[in-house]
Amino acid sequence: MSTASAASPVILWQMSRIWGIPNPSPFCMKVETWLRMAGIPYEPRALTGPPKSSTRKVPFIERPDGSLLSDSGRIIRVLSRERGVDLDAALGPRERAESLMLRRMLEEHLYFVVLAERWVEDAGWEKCKADYFQTLPGPVRVLLPPVVRRQIKRDAHGQGLARLEPEERLLRAEADLEALAFVLGDRDYFFGAPSTLDAIALGFLTNLLRAPLDGPVHRAGSRHDNLVRYERRLMERYFPEFSGAAAAR
């Protein structure tokens, strides 16, 4: 890749910014955090129609040559290679294993607990329905939400966690957060310096601590003082324009 291409910004397509946080999607915020940590120039754009990505989901990026790249993990992996940056280069084998396990816990377990609270439970859905789609044209804002909700409820039911009682899902979320807090301890970053895991953890913790939702899963993170301090510290460093917008609860 040429030097000019390496310095050219990518376009980050993601959900609209709401709630005074970078993004209500942990995966969109994960990619934006990673881009800032890696020092890669980018232009954030809010989606106004169906995603053009191969996965039909956000986030996805548009590279300087016009090509699209989807899936948050793949975006990070490919950009690391193309831009010559690797936030995980200093991690040893044990740290890489710990990072992988915590990533899987957040993205493939805790995510679906949060998803159920926002999209399956009626109380969470009423708030999300009003806010997620507020920038869409009037008729679309009325017709689209129930269609999207049906699709997400079907996916969540197939994954399995949404079939459990809310109390059981909460117990599992609390166990995830307790494990995350234990591994972090009193460190500034999980492995001493910014890594991909920190980008992922910040996306989830900001959504748990700052989103204006009153579900028990969203409140669970605030019980861990070290996670609250960690989230506030990273927000102040990487998203100073948002860090004072809403204090972590």
Image (tube, helix red, strand yellow):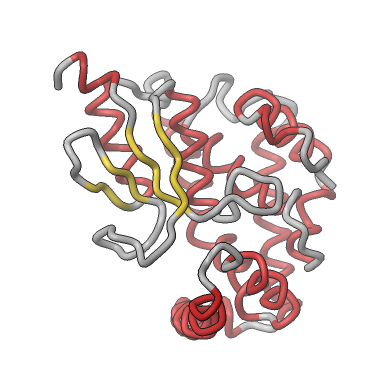
Residue 239 placement (x, y as % from top left) = 63, 31
Q: Which image quadrant is residue 124 in? A: bottom right
Q: Residue at x 59, y 30 (%)?
A: 190
Outermost residue toward the front?
138
Q: Which image quadrant is residue 12 in? A: top left
In this rendering, is residue 189 above or below 66?
above
Asked if residue 230 lies left or right of residue 84, the reply is: right
Asked if residue 33 lies left or right of residue 88, the reply is: right
In this rendering, is residue 219 above or below 245?
below
Q: Residue at x 75, y 49 (%)?
A: 210
What quarter of the picture does the N terminus occupy? top left
Outermost residue toward the top?
3
Between residue 201 and residue 43, name the one nearer to us. 43
In this rendering, is residue 223 above or below 145?
above
Q: Residue at x 54, y 54 (%)?
A: 16
Residue 91 placement (x, y as % from top left) = 43, 24
Residue 53 placement (x, y as % from top left) = 28, 58
Q: Residue at x 68, y 27 (%)?
A: 240
Residue 48 placement (x, y as % from top left) = 43, 60
Number of marks in picture:
0
